[in-house]
Image (cartoon, rainbow, N blue to C red):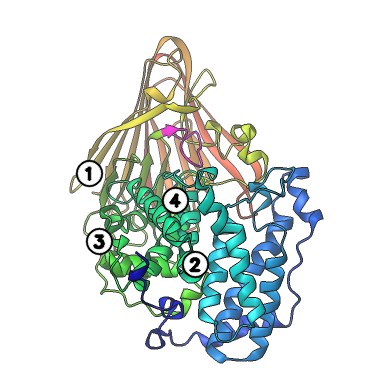
């Protein structure tokens, strides 16, 4: 197989005729700041803080800065040839190579085994970054630095993964972004620094098998159960390898042809919420910048590339995440998507909108699934209603990534438990935890003027609580800004207090017991309780909760409660300018 690898490392990254224009000024500005500052310091006190307090940031902030800064220094050195950038880059590389471990503290046991070779997301991506720099600047780096890069990658990654791939749980965990990130990054590093080595062919075959396994786990239409954030993270590293493999072999090995990758551009396109955010179920974030190179490669190599090109005109892209940002990637002409409704059947998400042209237009998204998904939240039946550029009925996304967040205490956190979602509660209890607690979209009907979506949520609840839970959605497109009707039908064996909860974003005003208005930045949403006849309604909130990116949020919700053995809730949502 190695005979197919005929392209040298630098040209895998960029050829002279592929260089991007108009990036020098920005790159040099960043590189100058880096040159004038010391290499960020990572010490043991910060490292151990995670295991003492659960806080990741003290160590991961400088740890991450090092890895971001080497990208700017490498690009600046390549574009200008100036020695000061090479010298500073070499200091960074030396420092990174001196780190006791390239792993994040959150991925390590409290008591380290210094004989064990830990390989996680950061170990893998660090290896890929250093390997690409090795190829790009091979004629400029000192021999000591080049030899150190090759040695550290070999000792920390290639040899342990070659000898005992089964020791790494992510290797064949195809349904997780870990498989894509670790295998993709290792494969990229291998192409740049592993050729001619005894381990090359075995590792390459293992990586190709795992990346194909990861691709197999996509929804038939290209969706990813972990949401757009982790779709972006996983596929960025998988396609970095796919691209390197394709270019190194002059197209002889082409993983872009995988049928699910041909469709995957549909996922971010349909999850798009105008003007520039995304559906954010699970541990995903709404305000997300997608990787530039990933989106350009998808637009260039896949079936829905023209639709992806359209999306690129509307969203923010994360640039200079790796040195492939040097390359100009040609994309096809823009084509606005045709279908306004999609059902990702394998992950069981449905997303619909009135049209693609109106930035104020309504979008509705809902998920079924089960309660043991990767980056799981207890959220079977969760939905989002987006209009006027805002999520009025919302999902609050991901909480702060602390030690407790990834422990059994995870489900004490409103970001992850049922309390923080628009679900149904029976005598104060809600859905069960585990794969067996699941729901199903049983109807997804698309019409010119109205879409209907029905979910059977019965299986998401303990059987002694309910006998039937159905959630029905009618999304009308007759009105300028749409109209939404949410109907929840709940049946129990004995008389119980039954509650439906609606999460909202904005300022809520109560007009009377049946009528409310949510005021947003650009419009308002009327909420009218049509059924049941007898009910109680209260507002609730969880205050000042830390989020993934350090902000604080207050979750706000309406609790509509009635008592009986069969209750039908009907709530209409009417957007108004």
Front of the two marks 4 and 3: 3
Q: Which residues are magenta?
A: 370-379
**Tag shown at residue 524:** 4
Front of the two marks 2 and 1: 2
Q: Is residue 364 above or below residue 204?
A: above
- CA–CA distance between discs 4 and 3? 28 Å
- Tell whether label 3 touches label 4 (CB within 8 Å): no
- Tell whether label 1 touches label 2 (CB within 8 Å): no
Q: Tag 1, which secondary structure?
A: strand
Lower position in the chain sequence, tag 1 or tag 3: 3
Lower position in the chain sequence, tag 3 or tag 2: 2
Front of the two marks 3 and 2: 2
**Tag shown at residue 290:** none
**Tag shown at residue 194:** 2
Front of the two marks 4 and 1: 1
- Tell whether label 1 touches label 4 (CB within 8 Å): no
- CA–CA distance between discs 4 and 1? 22 Å
> How busy is the neighbourhood of tag 4: few (under 14 within 10 Å), some, or many (20 plus)?
many
Residue denoted by label 3:
337
Q: Is residue 404 above or below residue 488?
A: below
- Examine the residues drawn in magenta and state their main secondary structure: loop
From this viewpoint, is residue 412 visible? no
> How busy is the neighbourhood of tag 3: few (under 14 within 10 Å), some, or many (20 plus)?
some
Residue 533: x and y in percent read 39, 21
- Tell whether label 2 touches label 3 (CB within 8 Å): no
Toward the viewer: 328 or 286? 328
Residue denoted by label 1:
450
């Amino acid at each position: 197989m190695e005979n197919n690898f005929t392209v040298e490392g630098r040209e895998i990254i960029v050829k002279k005729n592929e260089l991007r224009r108009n990036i020098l000024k920005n790159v040099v500005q960043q590189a100058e700041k880096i040159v004038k500052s010391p290499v960020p310091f990572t010490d043991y006190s910060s490292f151990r803080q995670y295991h003492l307090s659960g806080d990741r940031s003290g160590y991961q902030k400088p740890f991450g800065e090092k890895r971001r800064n080497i990208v700017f220094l490498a690009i600046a050195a390549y574009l200008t040839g100036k020695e000061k950038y090479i010298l500073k880059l070499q200091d960074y590389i030396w420092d990174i190579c001196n780190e006791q471990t390239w792993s994040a503290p959150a991925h390590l046991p409290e008591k380290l085994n210094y004989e064990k070779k830990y390989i996680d997301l950061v170990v893998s991506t660090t290896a890929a970054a250093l390997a690409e720099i090795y190829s790009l600047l091979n004629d400029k780096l000192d021999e000591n630095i080049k030899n150190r890069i090759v040695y550290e990658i070999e000792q920390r990654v290639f040899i342990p993964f070659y000898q005992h791939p089964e020791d790494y749980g992510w290797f064949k965990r195809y349904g997780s972004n870990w498989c894509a990130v670790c295998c993709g990054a290792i494969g990229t590093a291998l192409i740049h620094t592993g050729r001619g080595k005894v381990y090359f062919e075995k590792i390459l075959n293992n990586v190709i098998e795992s990346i194909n396994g990861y691709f197999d786990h996509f929804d038939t239409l290209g969706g990813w159960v972990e949401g757009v954030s982790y779709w972006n993270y996983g596929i960025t590293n998988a396609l970095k390898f796919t691209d390197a493999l394709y270019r190194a072999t002059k197209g002889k090995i082409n993983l872009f042809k995988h049928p699910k990758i041909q469709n995957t551009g549909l996922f971010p396109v349909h999850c798009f919420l105008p003007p520039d955010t995304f559906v954010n179920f699970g541990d995903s974030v709404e305000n997300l910048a997608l990787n530039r190179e990933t989106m350009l490669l998808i637009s260039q190599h896949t079936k829905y590339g023209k639709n992806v090109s359209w999306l690129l005109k509307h969203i923010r892209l994360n640039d200079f995440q790796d040195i492939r940002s040097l390359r100009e990637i040609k994309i096809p002409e823009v084509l606005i998507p045709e279908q306004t409704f999609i059902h990702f059947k394998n992950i069981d998400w449905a997303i619909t909108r009135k049209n693609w042209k109106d930035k104020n237009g309504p979008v509705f998204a809902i998920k079924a699934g089960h309660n043991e998904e990767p980056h799981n939240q207890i959220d079977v039946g969760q939905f989002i209603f987006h209009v006027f550029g805002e999520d009025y009925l919302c999902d609050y996304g991901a909480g702060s990534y602390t030690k407790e967040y990834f422990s059994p205490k995870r489900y004490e956190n409103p970001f992850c438990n049922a309390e923080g979602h628009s679900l149904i509660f029976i005598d104060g209890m809600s859905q069960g935890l585990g794969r067996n607690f699941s729901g199903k979209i049983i109807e997804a009907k698309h019409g010119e003027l109205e879409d209907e979506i029905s979910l059977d949520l019965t299986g998401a609840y303990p059987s002694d609580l309910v006998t039937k839970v159905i959630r029905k959605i009618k999304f009308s497109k007759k009105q300028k800004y749409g109209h939404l009707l949410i109907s929840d039908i709940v049946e129990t064996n004995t008389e119980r207090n039954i509650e439906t909860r609606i999460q909202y974003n904005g300022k809520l005003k109560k007009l009377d017991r049946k009528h409310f208005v949510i005021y947003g930045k650009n419009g308002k949403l009327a909420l009218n309780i049509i059924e049941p006849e007898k009910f109680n309604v209260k507002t609730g909130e969880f205050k000042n909760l830390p989020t993934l990116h350090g902000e604080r949020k207050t979750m706000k919700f309406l609790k509509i409660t009635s008592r009986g053995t069969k209750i039908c809730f009907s709530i209409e949502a009417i957007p108004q300018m």
